[in-house]
Amino acid sequence: MLKKAVLAGAVAFGLGLAGAAHAGTVDVWFHAGKGEERELLSSLIENFTAENPGIEINLVLLPEGSYNDQVNAAALSGDLPDLLDFDGPFIANYVWSGFLTPLNGKVDQAIIDDLLPSIVEQGTYPPDGNLYSIGMFDSGLSLWGNKAFLVKAGVRIPEHVGDAWTLAEFEDVLAKLAATEGVKWPLDLKLNYGTGEWFTYGFSPIIQSMGSDLIDRTDWRATGAVDGDGAVKGMQALQKWVNNGWVVPASAGDTNFYSEKNVGLAFVGHWMFTPHTKGLGDDAILIPIPKFGSAHATGMGSWNWGLTESSDDKEDAITFLEYLMQPEQVARWGNEIGSVPARVEALKYAKNFAEGGRLALYVEQLNSIAVPRPFHPAYPTITTAYAEAVNNIIAGGDVEAELKKAAKSIDEDIEDNDGYPPFGG
């Protein structure tokens, strides 16, 4: 059942998807995210197959919202691909479940040595210290602003992490934008993405800045963390922005900031670089994520590649992975998508990330205030529970009650799995 559903939405290169895989055929799963990401990967595959005529690439695109569920279903039925693309925080669960094989000794060590520290951290499984995934890029999470509206509103525009807006300043900016001619909504929080990983990746830095977290990273309990005082304050602030009419509703879609141009600020990740800059030109400016509380936090980690334990063509899969990780290919993700190149060597080809470049702020944030999502096998439950709580809070639910419900769900899952040894238990 799963395989038929997957193949129906697949994009195939080389031999296509018909028939059983054989030596020289690499099955690759990729999330069906932004169109420009799919187009770039397709271009890289075409170039690779032209240079490596003995290796065929079968690319399968899976819906991003249900990606983890489909990976788990495929693992149970023995249908995992050779090379698996997946969101970084799921690695602990995938390794713990036996889906992935270490990349140490398989991928050229020169590539590994050149990776950003955050990419190595994301891909390393603490219990055994092995590297199980590498990504072509890290993420950037901050504010995009329409400079014309901000100037008209007469607000201070921060440029670096050290002069970011506080919560009070941020809310003052939202109030002033709301009163600015041409602004229909001061803030786009991308609520149109719906309940899912965006709600965790995007909004957990708010509670982390307030002194809470998705889970306590010492005793691995969610109670007292995701429902702690800081989390309550952070989600009350989020609910206030929505209730004040400051936030673009989900029903209004994705394009108000850069197409209709009736929004002052967009709180989103690097993947909106292309539409923002094409739509607003020089008026699209990158602004540091606000320092909502006593700490300062932003998101990090993104989609990356892992070699499955069940792969019957590991050698060719590694050949393809090493091609993707060449500096020139990695730099293309930075130049064309706006994501932070994962290799130090690639930064020389990605001018936007150099000092003074249009996206240099992302590098500054990653080097100073980025917080990884919890590296724990219970992460699928952690993100599902928190995202559901955020969704209910946005809809007007009681903040404390929703967060307590999330904490209970996470802790019950951990208890049901005896603490996910060797993490606990």
Image (cartoon, grey):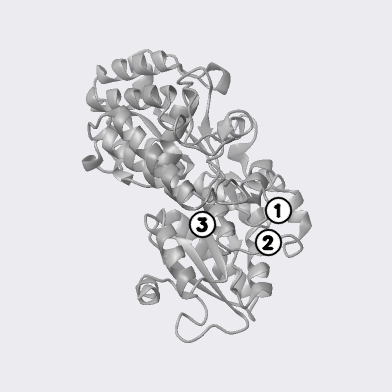
Q: Quadrant of residue 103?
A: bottom right
Kindly identify which residue carries mark 2: 102
The mark that comes first in sequence, 1 or 2, is 2
Residue 6 at what x, y percent from top left?
39, 71
Question: Is residue 284 among the parts visible in the rendering?
Answer: no
Residue 198 at what x, y percent from top left?
40, 43
Q: Nearer the viewer, mark 1 or mark 2?
A: 1
The mark that comes first in sequence, 3 or 1, is 3
Badge 1 amino acid: Asp
Q: Check disc 1 and report its element: helix, strand or loop.
A: loop
Please tell me whether residue 176 is drawn above or below residue 30 in the rendered image.
Answer: above
Badge 3 amino acid: Phe
Q: Residues within 10 Å of mark 1 (few under 14, many from 20)?
A: few
Q: Check disc 3 and report its element: helix, strand or loop.
A: strand
Question: Is residue 362 among the parts visible in the rendering?
Answer: yes
232 sits left or right of 25 in the view: left
Distance of label 2 from label 3 (alpha carbons): 15 Å
Q: In the image shown, does 371 or 153 lie closer to the viewer?
A: 371
Residue 16 at what x, y percent from top left?
47, 80
Residue 214 at what x, y percent from top left?
47, 36
Q: Residue at the spot x=52%, y=44% of the render?
A: 338
Q: Which of marks 2 and 3 is in front?
A: 2
Kindly identify which residue carries mark 3: 86
Badge 2 amino acid: Pro
Q: Residues within 10 Å of mark 3 (few under 14, many from 20)?
A: many
Picture disc at residue 128: 1
Q: Are marks 1 and 2 in contact (CB under 8 Å)?
A: yes
